[in-house]
Image: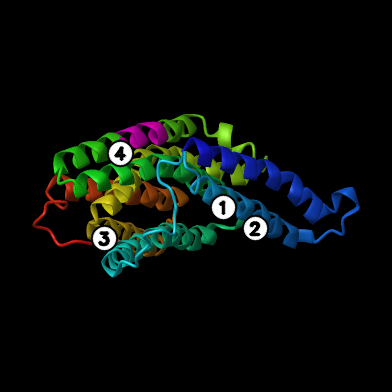
Amino acid sequence: MRASAVVMVGAACLQIPLAGVLVLGWGGVSPLGIAGAPTAALITFGLGAAVCIWLLTQRSSPIRLSQQGFKFDRVALGRFISVGTLASVGPFLTVGSVVLLGRFVGQFGEAAFAGYGIGTRLEFLIIPVVMGIGTAVITLVGSNIGAGRLDKALRAAWTGAGAAALIVGAFGCLFALFPSIWAASFTSDAATLDSAYAYLRIAGPGYVFLGLGLTLYFASQGAGRMAWPVAAGVFRVLIILIGGLLVTSLPDLQLKSLYALILIGMAIYGITIAAAIRYGAWNKGGNPV
């Protein structure tokens, strides 16, 4: 991970000035405008990918890429596709819940919607923190499941989930107690800040459940058991959809009631996945995927 982290940091350090060159025309280069931003991303991360591939071909690499002895494995490919297809549903459900609730929040006007956007931006920035832990958990869980050590796989999953819940939960509680630290860096508009503050104060504590659920979502990929994690994501969307329709149909509609749905959705998401694993979703008798 050290090598790949260095490559990622290097790519980011290159992308920022390259974006200035391509977007704004620094150094006399013909500016591409907004199209320069994705062009810079393609170039820098393309180079980063090439460097990572080169590193994996070196003798010093613990896992060395080589064409020697390569054989197409349909069983392994099928396993990747079956688990990966279900796992890919998760991000769509996460984004879908944000977009869906945004539809309801939009009824309160532009300022409320802008404040909601500031709040949800924090959630999307916290997800990569969980991913850092989750990718390690996938490896630990998968290797132990493959070795027939369900006990060690579960221990790794619960340890990673606990760490993620603690870390992102601490951030959520911090911004719930002091919402201006985050929201005031984006705007000074009073109405927008009111909406953002309400979001952070209500939804912030729910990041504990979000960290728990997302990490166990990653762990379930390593275990090859994705049915319950995906179901938990569906439950979260349904809570926001049904709750949003009920709240917006009330005569005394309140923005805080919609934000409460975010907290409830996160709690149901994390608790559902945790309960499923706790009560045997990974047992050998269960159906894979």
Q: Amino acid at mark 1?
A: Ala
From which residue to which does the magenta span run? 160-169
Counting from the top left corner in percent of width and height, residue 161 is at 30, 38
Nearest the viewer among 72 and 9 is: 72
Q: Residues within 10 Å of mark 3 (few under 14, many from 20)?
A: some
Name the N-terminal-most of marks 4 and 2: 2
Q: Do the residues under discs 2 and 1 have CB atoms within 8 angstroms?
A: no
Residue wearing tag 4 = 161
Q: Amino acid at mark 4?
A: Ala
Asked if residue 149 shows in the view, the reply is yes
What number is the disc on residue 49? 1
Q: CA distance from mark 4 to mark 3?
A: 18 Å
Nearer the observer, disc 3 or disc 2? 2
Name the N-terminal-most of marks 1 and 4: 1
Q: Amino acid at mark 2?
A: Leu
Position of 70 relative to 167 (above/below): below
Q: Do the residues under discs 4 and 3 have CB atoms within 8 angstroms?
A: no
Counting from the top left corner in percent of width and height, residue 134 is at 36, 43
